[in-house]
Image (cartoon, grey):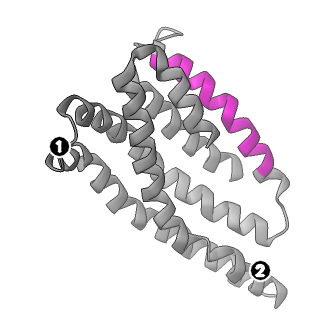
Amino acid sequence: MAMSVIDTVMVGRLGAVPVAAVALGGGFYFTSVVICLGVLTAVAPLAAYAIGAGDRDAAGRTAASALARAGLLSLPVIAVLTMADRLLAVIGYAAALSVEIGRFLHAVCWGAPGFLAFAVLRSLLTALQRTRGVMIVLTLCVPANAALNWVFIYGHLGLPALGLSGAAVASASVQWLMMAGLI
């Protein structure tokens, strides 16, 4: 939620259409990955059960299977989100807004595999009662998102200004960093 707020605020200087696009696009993205999370959060109780039964290997196998499932679930998310601008135009969204939402979704969708893998690892660490790392990673992702937005939206540190797409690139990058942080 904090990352979405940061994206919206930092895109604010670009105008009304980009703000609407990042808010709506973020909502579409979030809804897509939350549907997948419903399947993947089963890792926590299944791994906890295995750990409670003294079978840590089964907990590892559960997480490995869920990581593979996360990769597979990412594919339809990416496919749908890369076509979303056309779908939105068909159902009556304003053409300019559909294009901007599409620009956002075309970039942010590549964060889905990282985010879904993060969710699996978070569930495993919860089952292992090692939640401190999860808290640290989540706490660091908010300022990381703001910093990357500053770089990618406005083109700092020698990079080109990507505007609205920069917010999506920043969010997708942070989702991969969140996964890496738990690994």
Position of residue 48 measured from the top left corner of the image (x, y, whole percent): 77, 80
Q: Secondary structure at mark 1?
A: helix
* Residue named by callout 2: 48
Depth-wise, is mark 2 or mark 1 nearer the camera?
Answer: 1
How far apart are the two marked residues, 2 and 1, measured between alpha carbons? 45 Å
Q: Secondary structure at mark 2?
A: helix
State if disc 1 and disc 2 touch (CB < 8 Å): no
Q: Earlier in the sequence, mark 2 or mark 1?
A: 2
Residue 181 within the magenta-colored segment of the rendering:
no
Position of residue 16 measured from the top left corner of the image (x, y, whole percent): 38, 22
Position of residue 31 measured from the top left corner of the image (x, y, whole percent): 45, 56
Image: 28 above or below 99: below
Which amino acid type corresponds to the residue marked 2 in the rendered image? Ala
Direction from residue 98 to residue 16 in the image, left or right: right
Which quadrant of the figure contains the N terminus? top right
Residue 138 within the magenta-colored segment of the rendering:
yes
Q: Main secondary structure of the magenta part?
A: helix
Which amino acid type corresponds to the residue marked 1 in the rendered image? Ala
Most extreme residue toward the bottom is 53
Q: Residue at x 49, y 69 (%)?
A: 68
Tag of residue 89: 1
Q: For mark 2, does the 10 Å Cα neighbourhood hold few (<14), some (14 to 19), or many (20 or more) residues?
A: many
Q: Viewer-proximal residue, 58 or 114?
A: 114
Magenta segment: 135-153
